[in-house]
């Protein structure tokens, strides 16, 4: 399970400590839930999923509600909330802390922090931060480029020419993201983001030349930090005995972190301009997302009938 240290979140938000249990070291406290909670169901005695690994935010709305409660009702509410032993309470909107809140926070070792932002903005900012940090990430051997706005993952066995194709695509004005290794992260929109490991960012290995710095050679416009993964192009050695896809009747895909990504396989043989093939594949994939499918256009013209797009046969190639 991935986690974010509470001290990292405090540094990110600029939060100030208001109250803390004597001797409690919260620096190693882990946040494991990307949801930011407010006092909600707990206020009427119902327990939500909030618990260890979560953070709680209090603003003016909660303060107004607490002011309507009798002391006995407050104690019942705070016992219900703080017994969940969540990671921290953040106070926004310049809300005034009820002394009973501090008492129960100390009882259950929950540190309290104040933030300058209002509750709504704070929740939005922190949710985005935690989603980015806590979403699952994998690293796989593949190059990655942005071609006409399409994120294309280049795969194939070592030495088949992925880096050379990437270099040609960069030379044609497309954006370089990573070479050999790509980190893949699933985001909250159920799509995949690809980026380069920080230690090899901007570098590409070209056999016969060596390591080059893409940004220094081609300029800052040749580099992109990340992109959504839209397609996988796999290079494989040409096999004369194998039948390769010619019409596109089968829809091949790979499943990465549970997300389906279109997949095509390109045979490598002398005389093929692989960079142009990858470029055309990227543009064709973008057209398909817009509802334009060349295969069905051709079938309609040949048959003389207006054939609507139908569900193609799907074939899973691999799962990560």
Image (tube, rainbow, N blue to C red):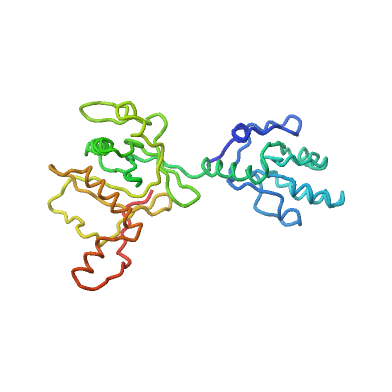
131 shown above or below 316? above
Please state the total of marks drawn on the protein image: 0
The location of residue 54, given as percent across then percent down, is: 64, 44
Q: For the view shown, which residue lies furthest in the bottom direction?
A: 305
Compare residues 305 and 211 and report the one nearer the observer. 305
- Point 16% across, 54% down: residue: 242
Q: Quadrant of residue 220?
A: top left
The location of residue 100, given as percent across then percent down, is: 82, 42
291 shown above or below 28? below
Compare residues 146 and 80 and report the one nearer the observer. 146
- Point 32% across, 35% down: residue: 179
The location of residue 127, given as percent across then percent down, is: 58, 45
Q: Locate residue 212 relative to residue 246 in the image: left or right.
A: right
- Point 27% across, 71% down: residue: 307
Q: Locate residue 183 relative to residue 161 in the image: left or right.
A: right
Q: Quadrant of residue 315?
A: bottom left
- Point 38% across, 48% down: residue: 320
188 shown above or below 169? below
Q: Locate residue 124 relative to residue 181 in the image: left or right.
A: right
The location of residue 28, given as percent across then percent down, is: 62, 33
């Amino acid at each position: 399970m991935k986690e974010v240290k509470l001290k990292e979140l405090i540094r990110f938000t600029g939060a100030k400590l208001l109250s803390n249990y004597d001797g409690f070291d919260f620096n190693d406290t882990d946040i494991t839930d990307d949801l930011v909670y407010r006092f909600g169901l707990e206020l009427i005695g119902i327990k939500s999923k909030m618990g260890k690994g979560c953070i709680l935010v209090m603003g003016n709305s909660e303060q107004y509600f607490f002011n309507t409660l009798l002391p006995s009702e407050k104690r019942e509410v705070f016992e219900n909330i703080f017994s969940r032993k969540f990671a921290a309470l953040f106070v926004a909107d310049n809300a005034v802390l009820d002394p009973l809140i501090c008492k129960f926070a100390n009882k259950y070792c929950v540190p309290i922090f104040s933030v300058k932002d209002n509750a709504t903005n704070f929740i939005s900012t922190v949710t985005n931060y935690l989603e980015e940090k806590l979403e699952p990430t994998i690293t796989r051997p593949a190059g990655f480029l942005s071609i006409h706005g399409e994120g294309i993952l280049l795969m194939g066995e070592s030495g088949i020419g992925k880096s050379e194709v990437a270099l040609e695509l960069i030379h044609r004005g497309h954006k370089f993201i990573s070479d050999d290794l790509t980190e893949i992260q699933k985001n909250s929109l159920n799509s995949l983001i690809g980026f380069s490991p920080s230690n090899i960012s901007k570098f590409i290995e070209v056999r016969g030349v060596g390591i080059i710095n893409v940004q220094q050679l081609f300029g800052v416009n040749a580099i992109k930090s990340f992109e959504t993964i839209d397609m996988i192009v796999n290079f494989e050695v040409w096999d004369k005995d194998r039948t390769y896809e010619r019409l596109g009747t089968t829809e091949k895909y790979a499943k990465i972190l549970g997300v389906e990504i279109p997949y095509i396989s390109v045979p490598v043989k002398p005389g093929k301009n692989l960079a142009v093939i990858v470029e055309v594949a990227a543009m064709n994939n973008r057209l398909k997302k817009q509802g334009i499918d060349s295969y069905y256009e051709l079938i309609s013209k040949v048959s003389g009938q207006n054939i609507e797009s139908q569900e193609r046969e799907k074939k899973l190639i691999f799962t990560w």
